[in-house]
Image (spheres, rainbow, N blue to C red):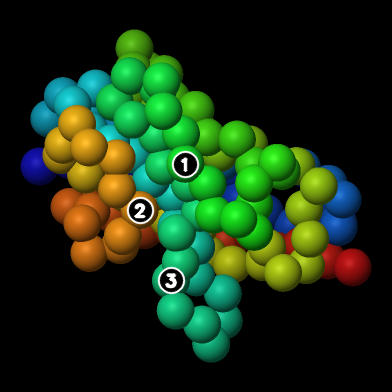
């Protein structure tokens, strides 16, 4: 079992930045691919970013490429999402998720464990 707890969400003006954190406990964190997803009001949850167990490979949705950066610190059992140049359309609940594999995946059903989510609101 893996428990995931997100933090760092909040209200920010367009063009601003936030850094989300996801603290993991339970089975060996470094064995997991970690991902970030988001769900805006009235929309389905969508993939944002993912990172391999070593941190050597990262993947991003086209909508956030160049603005968001995913990273991880296996010594701290934590994955981060640095979000820059935020836009109102980035407003959503952001979830981190864990996938027990060496293969990085971006499909939501592939992920085994989920956090409760943290709200990010970007105002105009």
- State how far apart marks 3 and 1 are (Cα): 17 Å
Q: Which class describes the residues within 10 Å of circle 3: few (<14), some (14-19), or many (20+)? A: some
Q: Is residue 54 above or below residue 106?
A: above
Question: Residue 47 shows which numbered tag?
Answer: none
Residue position for label 3: 45
Q: Return the disc, 2 or 3, that comes first in the chain's sequence.
A: 3
Image point (59%, 67%), residue name: 92
Instruction: Say which element carries label 1.
Output: strand
Q: Do the residues labelled 2 and 1 touch (CB within 8 Å)?
A: yes
The quarter in which the N terminus is drawn is: top left
- State how far apart marks 2 and 1 are (Cα): 8 Å
Image point (22%, 37%), residue name: 103
Image point (46%, 34%), residue name: 58
Q: Quadrant of residue 72?
A: top left
Q: Point out residue 95 in the picture as x, y percentages from the top left corner.
A: 43, 55
Residue position for label 1: 59
Left or right: where 36 falls relative to 98 = right
Q: Return the disc, 3 or 1, that comes first in the chain's sequence.
A: 3
Q: Which class describes the residues within 10 Å of circle 2: few (<14), some (14-19), or many (20+)? A: many
The quarter in which the C terminus is drawn is: bottom right
Q: Which of 19 and 111 is in front in this view?
A: 111
Instruction: Say which element carries label 2.
Output: loop
Q: In this view, does 92 lie above or below 22?
A: below
**Can you tell which of label 3 and label 1 is closer to the viewer?**
1
Q: Point out residue 68 in the picture as x, y percentages from the top left corner.
A: 64, 42
- State how far apart marks 2 and 3 are (Cα): 12 Å
Left or right: where 110 falls relative to 58 = left
Residue position for label 2: 106
Q: In which quarter of the image is residue 30?
A: top left
Image point (57%, 61%), residue name: 119
């Amino acid at each position: 079992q893996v428990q995931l707890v997100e933090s760092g969400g909040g209200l920010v003006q367009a063009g601003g930045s936030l850094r989300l954190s996801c603290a993991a406990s339970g089975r060996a964190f470094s064995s997991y691919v970690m991902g970030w997803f988001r769900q805006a009001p009235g929309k389905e949850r969508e993939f944002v970013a993912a990172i391999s167990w070593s941190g050597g490979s990262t993947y991003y949705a086209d909508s956030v490429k160049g603005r968001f950066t995913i990273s991880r610190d296996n010594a701290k059992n934590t994955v981060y999402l640095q979000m820059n140049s935020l836009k109102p359309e980035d407003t959503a609940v952001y979830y981190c998720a864990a996938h027990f594999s060496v293969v990085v995946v971006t499909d939501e059903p592939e992920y085994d464990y989920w956090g409760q989510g943290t709200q990010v609101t970007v105002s105009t």
